Each structure stands twice: as structure tokens, then as C-alpha cells.
Image: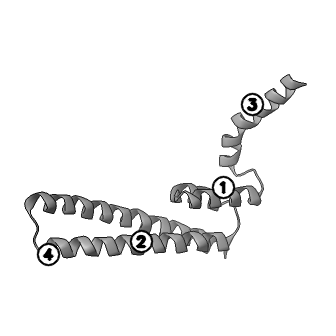
Amino acid sequence: MLGVNLLVRAGRSLLAGPVADAGWLPGSYYRHLVLEALEEDDFPGALNYLKWTGDPLLAQLLILRVRLLAREHRQQRQTLQDLLANGLPEDRREKCLALLKKQERALEFLTEYEGRALKVCGEKK
């Protein structure tokens, strides 16, 4: 009996990924995956499973989270731009420029995620 249970568990763990990625499971399973991904700020993962939830409210939650995070990045970007405008020593200036570049890249990603989530919302209407 113990051997059969181990075999069933092994089968579930091996098939869970491919079956979940195929969209064959109930929407409630995918809602759980989306919420788990949002908790970890894994926006690509959340968007991957969002299309199978059939839940526009969940898409709106993702959009809200992305917009709040983008606002934080815009504020940090503005702070860095203000620091650069005030004149800094060369070593600090280069660090600020590197951070500014990272903020710009983060905003690009967040804008892309928001657009993809909005597209999912539009498909559900």
C-alpha cells in the first residue's frame, strides 16, 4: 500500500507542471496560482495563469498591483534625477546613473505587464 501511495504522489508531481500549463484544470486552481504568483511579485507567472481563470476581478487586482509598483519606481526615478541634477561626485554620479537605468528598465517591464493584463481584461468582456 505504501508503494502505491508513493507512486501516485510521484505521478502527480511529474504531471502537475505540464497539465497546469496546458489549461486543463479548473479555474479555481489557476486562481490559486495567480494569487500565489502575485504574492511573490511574479507578474509573468501570474499573467501566464490569468488567461485560464476566467476572473476579470483577478486581472484588475494584478493591474492595481502593477500600477502601485510602477508609481513607486517613478518616484525613485524622480529622486535619482533630482540627485543627478544637483551635481554629484563622479563615483556617486555613475552609481546614480546605473540605478536610474535599472528604474527605467523596471518601468518598461511593468508597463508591458499592465498592457498584457489589460488585454486579458478586454478578452473577458
> Would residue 41 be visible to someone looking at this image?
yes
> Would residue 124 be visible to someone looking at this image?
no
Give the mark nearest the N terminus, 1 or 2. 1
Q: Secondary structure at mark 4?
A: helix
- The crowd level at tag 1 (other Cα within 10 Å; few <14, some 14-19, many 20+) is some
Classify residue 34 by image quadrant.
Answer: bottom right
Q: Secondary structure at mark 1?
A: helix
The residue that appears at 69% across and 61% down in the rendered structure is: 31
Residue beneath label 4, please?
A: 85
Using the numbered discs, state the Cα–Cα distance from disc 4 to disc 1 in whole angstroms.
Answer: 44 Å
Q: Nearer the viewer, mark 4 or mark 3?
A: 4
Using the numbered discs, state the Cα–Cα distance from disc 1 to disc 3 in whole angstroms.
Answer: 20 Å
Residue beneath label 3, please?
A: 10
Residue beneath label 1, please?
A: 33
The residue that appears at 42% across and 71% down in the rendered structure is: 70
- The crowd level at tag 2 (other Cα within 10 Å; few <14, some 14-19, many 20+) is many
Q: Position of residue 32 (x, y in %)?
A: 70, 58
